[in-house]
Amino acid sequence: MTSVRRLPDGFVLQSHERLASTNDEALRRAEAGAPAGLVVMAREQTRGRGRHGRVWASPPGNLYASVLLRPDCPMVVAAQLSLVAGLALGEALVRVGPPDLDLQLKWPNDVLIGGAKAAGILIEGASDAAGRASWVVVGSGVNIVSCPDDTAHPATFLAREGFAPLPPLAVLEAYLLELDRWLGRWREAGFGAVRQAWLARGFGLGGAVQLRLAGDQVKGRFLDLTDSGSLLVEQDGGGRREIAAGDVFFLGG
């Protein structure tokens, strides 16, 4: 393992050649009492995963990293960290990317470039008996030099989108600087403080949407993002509905 400089205060990096999953390693360390700010990074993952246990292809050259946080809030509020981290990662890529980068954020956890997925966020955590977050691990994967071809949604990678050659560590450093900034705003004023920045890059706003929920399906139009981070949908059958979690598919775009 190695350590580096140029990280924001409070973050400590543990870098590995190969791990099954950076999230799994961060979860293990969280349960052992590791402090907030631990960052676990791997050059390669052998069992990388995304939401709902989906496989995340993890060959060398891309970024695979997980950050341990211990937010002082209910677990239902900590779920907003997926959006906060997605915004931070998107802003970091804009900062290190080519001019006029067409970057958007797809609710709840994807970063798109030119409409194709370039990065994703996976959060996992544990709560105490009162429902407050004991710890949260925010995992991130960024396609820097490659992406899988057999994905449900089109995928891309930074080199294809005109980025200068970037080592994973450089992308991580840019991301952590933005994450530190947006976490500060979120802690001080809640998700409402970052909502407008997220909406400015929101993908599919105003468009037709289909959501697959546990035992349910919703079709309608993506109206807005609430101050709690939920998707506000105008349903096809009438009425508005707030969706806090689910798989979202934007139709016709």
Image: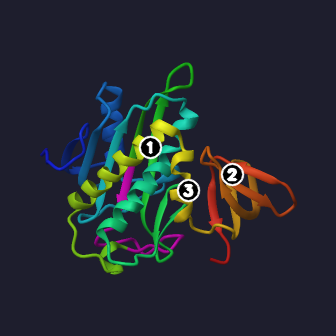
Q: Tell me the magenta residue range.
A: 139-156
The image shows residue 213 at horizontal and vertical percentages of 69, 51
**Residue at x 47%, y 42% (from the top left corner):** 186
Of all residues shown, which one is farthest toward the top?
Answer: 129
Q: Amino acid at mark 1?
A: Arg
Query: Comparing marks 2 and 1, which lies closer to the viewer?
Result: 1
Question: Is 208 above or below relative to 218?
Answer: below
Q: Does the stretch in magenta take in 8?
A: no
Query: Comparing marks 2 and 3, which lies closer to the viewer?
Result: 3
Please say if the residues under marks 1 and 3 sit with CB atoms less than 8 Å apart. no
The residue indicated by pointer 3 is 196
- In front here: 228 or 2? 228
The residue indicated by pointer 2 is 213
The residue indicated by pointer 1 is 185
Q: Amino acid at mark 3?
A: Gln
> Dot 1 surroundings within 10 Å: few (below 14), some, or many (20 or more)?
some
Q: Secondary structure at mark 2?
A: strand
Of all residues shown, which one is farthest toward the right?
Answer: 237
Q: Secondary structure at mark 3?
A: helix
Q: Main secondary structure of the magenta part?
A: loop
Along the polypeptide, which appears first: circle 2 or circle 3? 3
In the visual, does 12 lie left or right of 47? Answer: left
Query: Where the N terminus falls, by quadrant?
Result: top left
- In front here: 189 or 133? 189
CA gap, disc 1 and disc 3: 12 Å
The image shows residue 137 at horizontal and vertical percentages of 40, 40
**Residue at x 69%, y 70% (from the top left corner):** 207
Please say if the residues under marks 2 and 3 sit with CB atoms less than 8 Å apart. no
Dot label at residue 215 = none
